Amino acid sequence: MIRCAIIGFGKMGRTRERAIAASGKAKVVLVHDPFVTEFQGYPIAETPEAILSNPQVDAVFICAPNYQNKPLTIAALKADKHVFCEKPPAFTARQVEEIQAVEIASGKKLMYGFNHRHHGSIRAMKTLADSGQYGRILWMRGRYGKSVDHTYFETWRAKNEMAGGGILLDQGIHMLDLFLLLAGDFDQVQAIVSSLYWNLPGIEDNVFANFRNSKTGTAASLHSTMTQWRHLFSLEVFLQQGYMVLNGIKTQSGSYGDEILSVAKNRSIAPAATWDAEDTIKFSLDNSWSDETNYFLDAVLLNRPIESGNSNDALKVMRLIDAVYQTGHHQNGQLYNRLQGEALGSLK
């Protein structure tokens, strides 16, 4: 039985607590949150340090505000604890590299909460993409948006020094992670980062970004927004001989609608599919939280490597985010070559 502690007992902390309790593989022995007074009967640690120094804690779940993720992860690894940390892993790729150095030295398990990987629809898309039966991926398009009101900006999320960024780090990071999961890495980035409505320094409300792998030609387009005025999730993947389109995703709030995956394969010589060739699958249950938590707990119990949601995955996505922020404020639409670390000139 793994003895777990949770730092941060807001919405995400409570979600992780339920998954831990349901697993039968672990139990929560300590909880810390300076702003929460009701802990469902769990013992309270007055500080994060009280958790990290406690020899009765085997693993720590970090569900804190963004700016605490990196220092708490490093401190927990140095304290000989396994770590599960919510996204984002840090504010920059360089910071993730610093974490990795500590991770390697500690020999402990480290996993990040890229929860969307564990949805049934995403697993089905990954299996189909990897099978090769529809050929390779040509391009992808992802839209992830929500509407927020003034209460959003009464929290730490409205402070750049605490959040690290706006909607891209808050939500768009999940779509970027799915791009990487399905198609591998990208080395070219073009982006526009804007705050046209809320107009908060360092807290973007929209990101429009294009990504390309210069070797394979695979391209992806992302729109991450908090001025959608309605919650929306859409991931389209087009392959040489077919397509996969996921609209909606099951969430705790239910605000993104039904999770429906449509798949079609070109059955004729001409590169075209018809509506009646499309298969539609509706995913009615969201087991992603329990599946993700069990994956981490099994890695600890059985000493298995973290193969999905590991620090290398975190590093890849943060490198793309670095490139988006670096080039996204250029009004001339520069294309940024991430591998070379240089702008390639304006696109006209």
Image: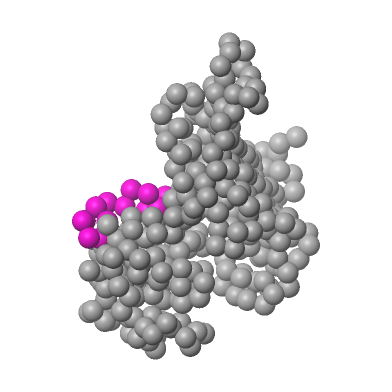
> Which residue is drawn at the image coordinates 21% and 56% (left, top)?
303
Between residues 40 and 200, which one lies in front from this camera angle?
A: 40
Can residue 66 be seen in this snapshot? yes
Q: Which residues are magenta?
A: 299-315
> Which residue is drawn at the image coordinates 61% and 17% (left, top)?
271
Which quadrant would the N terminus be assigned to in this image? bottom left
As drawn, the residue found furthest toward the top would be 269
Between residues 289 and 339, which one lies in front from this camera angle?
A: 289
The quarter of the picture where residue 267 lies is: top right
Q: Is residue 144 above or below residue 47?
A: above
Q: Is residue 310 magenta?
A: yes
Q: Is residue 64 left or right of residue 98?
A: right
Q: Is residue 65 left or right of residue 130?
A: right
Q: Is residue 11 above or below residue 190?
A: below
As drawn, the residue found furthest toward the right would be 197
**Residue 147: percent from the left, percent from the top?**
71, 61
Can residue 67 be seen in this snapshot? no
> Which residue is drawn at the image coordinates 74% and 44% (left, top)?
332
**Residue 117: percent from the left, percent from the top?**
46, 49
**Residue 176: percent from the left, percent from the top?**
54, 48
**Residue 247: percent from the left, percent from the top?**
62, 44
Q: Is residue 29 above or below residue 304?
A: below
> Which residue is drawn at the image coordinates 58% and 13% (left, top)?
268
Q: Is residue 26 left or right of residue 288?
A: left
